[in-house]
Every structure is written in structure tokens, then in C-alpha cells.
Amino acid sequence: MSNAFVTVTAPAVGAPVSIILTGVGGTIGSVGTAMLGSVIPAIQITPSAVSSSRAICTITTPAAVAIAPTASSASSASALVTRPAVVAITPTSSATSAAAALVTRPGIVVLTLSGSVSTSGATCSVVYPGEVITPIPTPISPVFVSTTRGPAVKWDWYLATPTFSGNVFQGFSNIGLLDTAQNRSIALSMNGVESAAFSVNILDSIAEQIWLHTLINCLVLYRNDEIKWSGPLWTARPTVNATTQTLQVTAVGWFQYLLKRLLKCGVEGVNPMVGPTSTSSGVSQSYVAMDPTAIAVDLVTRTNFEYPLPISIGFVEPNPNGVLWNVSYQQLQNIGQAIQTLSNVEGGFDFRVDPATLQLDFYYGLVKAGSTVYGRGQDRPNAVFNYPGNLTELAPTEDASNVATQMTVLDQLTNSSQYPGAGEITESITTYGMMQDTASLSDINSLTITTAYAGAEVAFRSAPEVIWTFTPFAYHGDADVPQPFVDYDIGDFVYLTANYGCLQVPLSTAMAAGPMPIRMFSFTITLDNEGNEMISNVQSVFTSTS
């Protein structure tokens, strides 16, 4: 829904003002009356109820507030402005003629406010649908019409409860629409715990279903009528004082439940020998020659036996390289952390809990043709970000603190793998010097995996890392601004160009002409109080196609 906020101040205080919703096909209905000199409360309008992409907001004020458009001569009756921030109009009209200022922009919301005060009045007409319209007639000053460009997409935030039948998720039972929520944001990330936040007034009736309802109720977020995020309420913090009466709320992604589960082994568990080739004792759980996704699935299956999770296993893509892993876990290993480690190890998978089905999906497909990147996402050659262009800010960081030109990796039995080998001098060592580091894969019992991990770490860390952080312009339906969930998503390859001083992209190190491919790892969506969608905190790293 769109909100229109109208404040009317005029000399004839106490005169009635009717508030009528109209469409091209006729009047939709009256929503009440107010008095001139009073503040008319917010009016909510459903766009689908309108038959045309035109909206008219009309305020008729007394003759004392006559109007002459500043864009034409003093005697002119009208002026056309294509996209003003403020339309300033000087009173000059008489009883026999009324001047008007017309602002035109496409949309679908229709709102008509009219006040019949005297036979000789001045009219300010604003055609600016789908956006917040604030006409402010005053008895002394000129009439100012302030317009704010409105949302091009529709976000609906619902408070809901997940429903189950026989421990199987059946869907969400909506409690109510959070239409008064403010300070809304969603933080999305790869293979991590995502979150959403908002605030409501403590006196709002829906606050009673939030406070003392964490882990019971959840958020379900729709973008253009499709579920794009959901998660349980995690924190609620009310604040009441002389100036504030706010309830601040956060929700987290469903994967958070797995970070609250521990592995029970052997006789300590109620489900010994779940894994296809696993062995279990009272103190450890071992997997021999298994696909990493199969290990993750088995870990989830084991904890589900103990007590059902709200999430279930969805689709599982096998390791495309056919590499089988040897992994061993100790009693009370955190299951969520174990899955994240399997994902982060070189050659690991990506995962995500589907917000509509609550199924944990495992991704192992090729993300970009010609690359060695596997997991979640796809190649998005049409999602191009550029500065100057469709970015409001480009703020990359070059960081040498993570450089490693030689890596030694220890497995569970403290066997070590080193890359490059002793006495081997690589180009990165020649360029940046001998920069050594070590890692311990305490759950892995395979030199094949530790050797691959060492090589992958050096390949990724052989030069100072450049993290590309940028902020696109807000999406308002403009074709040159990619929009989230449609033109790009987490895990996707998008493309970046820049031509500003020392910021020249593509980099010479990219070894390729044209925009530079970067992979999206995280971004934040912020919604202002009018519902305008803004993207910030985009974090991505240049990824070679080799």
C-alpha cells in the first residue's frame, strides 16, 4: 500500500474539508471529513483498486491563497513542471479565474482532497501518483507543493507463526501486517546467519504479539508478493521515556537453530549409525570417504532424531568433482558450526534455508562457465555496476594483512601439507616475499583435502585482497539500476566498472577486457518509512575465471 500524508492550513479555520478517493472510472469512496486548519491523518490506498495510472490530489483553498505559477507570466493560468522537488506558487488569482501548477508522473494511486470554502478560490492540482504528496497551503506565504518519489517495488512485512503437521512445515499463519513498522532493514549474506530489524510503537496493538514472543512468532517478508526472507523473532527491546515509546525488534535466519544444536554420538545419541558409511562411538562420529553434502545431511538428520527442527533437508547437489572426504567429530560438536566449516573448506558447498519452504538447500553447481567456482549463484552479465553511473558510492579496500604465499595445513592427526613445497619459489613469493601461515582442520582426516586446502589458500591469498564495497542508487524502475532478487542475488557474479582517478576498473590484474566479474557475498536492504528500497553495504571480491 502507498501512504499519502496531507496537512491543510487555511484562513477559514473550521470550514469542512471532504476527503474523497477517486479513480478515472469514478469515485471509489469517501473516507471522512476534516476541518481546515487541522491535520488530516495518514490515508492508505490500495493501488489495485484504481483503474488507471493517474492520480489527482486537489486542495481548494480560500481566495486569500490565490495562485500564480512561477514558471510562466503573472497572468498565466497554468504551468507544467516535469519533476520538481518543490513547486512554489505566488498568490494572484481572483474570483473569476484560478491558476494551477501541474506536476505529472506515472503511477497508480489516486487521492482527491477538496475543500469548498468560497466561490472564488485558488486551486493547486498535483498529478503525482504512487508517491507521497504533501500540499501545504498557508494563509500568508506562497503555496508550496512538496513531492517525494515513491517506491517502485512493494514490500509487505508480516508477523506470523510457522505451522506444522507431524513435524512437517505447512506454511505461515499471518498474525498481522507490520504496516506501521519503521527503520526496516534486511542483512543478507553467503552461508551465514542473516537478520532483519524494525521498530514499532509500543502502543501499537501488534506489539503485544512481539514482546515476550521471541522464538514463537516470526517475520515473513514479501517483495512484490513473493516471500524473500523469513526468520524467527530473536530480540525485542522496548524503550519508554518522556520522548520515546519504541519496541526495537530483530529476527534471524532459520539456520540459527542449527547453531543451537550439538552432535550426540553413539550411545549418547538416540540414532546411532545414521550415516551411510559412518562409524559412531560414545565419544566421536567419523565419516569415511563421503561426499561433504552427505555429511552435512547426516548431521542434520541426527539432531532431528533427538528433537525435530523447524527446518528440513531440501535439494542436495553432490560434489561435482567427486572428491570424497574423511571427517571425524567429537561428542557435543556444534552442528551449525560443523556445516559452516564444511562449506568454508576449499571445494566446499554453499547452503541456504529457503524462506518460503524452510528447507535447507545445498548448492554445488558451477556458478560461472569457465570458472572453478561452485556453489550458490549464477552468472549475471547484465547486472553491471559503474562509477560514475549507477553507484552513489564506491569504497574498495586493499588489505595485505591476509597475504600468504606459503601455507601449511594440519589435519586431525597433525599430519601436515605444505604448498608450495620446500625450496619452491613461486611468482607470488618473488613479488611479495615469503609470507607464511598455518591452518588446522581438526575435523578432517585426509591429506588429500589438506593439500588441496593449502593450495587453494595460497591461490586466494597470494596477493593483497581487494574487497569491493559499493552502494547503488535506489531502484525506482530505472533500467540502468539492477534490482535485488531480480537482476542479482547472493552468490551471483555481477560486473563492475570504474573510471575515477586511481580507481580504474577493470584492474590490469584482472587480465580481461570489459567489466570486472565480482561475486556478491553480502548486502543490506533498507526501507525508508515510505517504502523506498535502498541497497547498501554490498561486499564482493574479484573472482578470477580461471
Image (tube, rainbow, N blue to C red):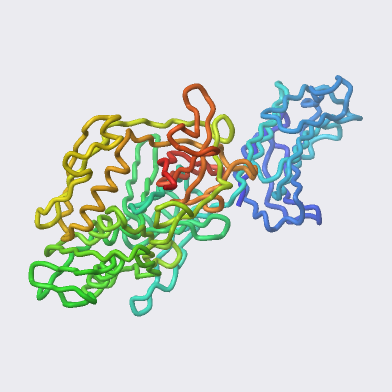
Point out residue 54 in the picture as x, y percentages from the top left corner: 76, 47
- From the viewer's side, name the closer residue of 373 and 77: 373
User: Is residue 223 found left or right of 93 in the rendered image?
Assistant: left
Name the residue: 48% across, 43% down: 517
Q: Given the current orientation, which residue lies at the most extreme right position?
A: 96
Q: In this view, does 542 lie above or below 32?
A: above
Residue 355 in which image quadrant: bottom left
Examine the rendered structure and indicate whether residue 78 appears above or below residue 177: above
Quarter occupied by residue 223? bottom right
Q: Where is residue 539 in the image (x, y as percent from the top left)?
A: 41, 41
Question: Between 272 and 253, which is closer to the camera in this rendering?
Answer: 272
Name, please, the residue furthest toward the left: 282
Task: Determine the residue located farthest toward the top in the rendered image.
Answer: 74
- Is residue 486 placed above or below 87 in the rendered structure? below
The answer to whether any part of residue 200 appears in the image is no
Q: State left or right for residue 218 relative to residue 27.
A: left
**Residue 477 picture location, percent across and down:** 64, 45
- Residue 433 vertical placement versus 338 (above, below): above
**How many numbered discs, if any?**
0
- Residue 101 image offset from top left, x and y in percent: 79, 31
Nearest the viewer among 285 and 441 is 441
Q: Which residue is drawn at 86% across and 20% down?
A: 73
Residue 433 appears in the figure: yes
Q: Which residue corresponds to the image point at 33% horizontal and 76% vertical from the top-left? A: 167
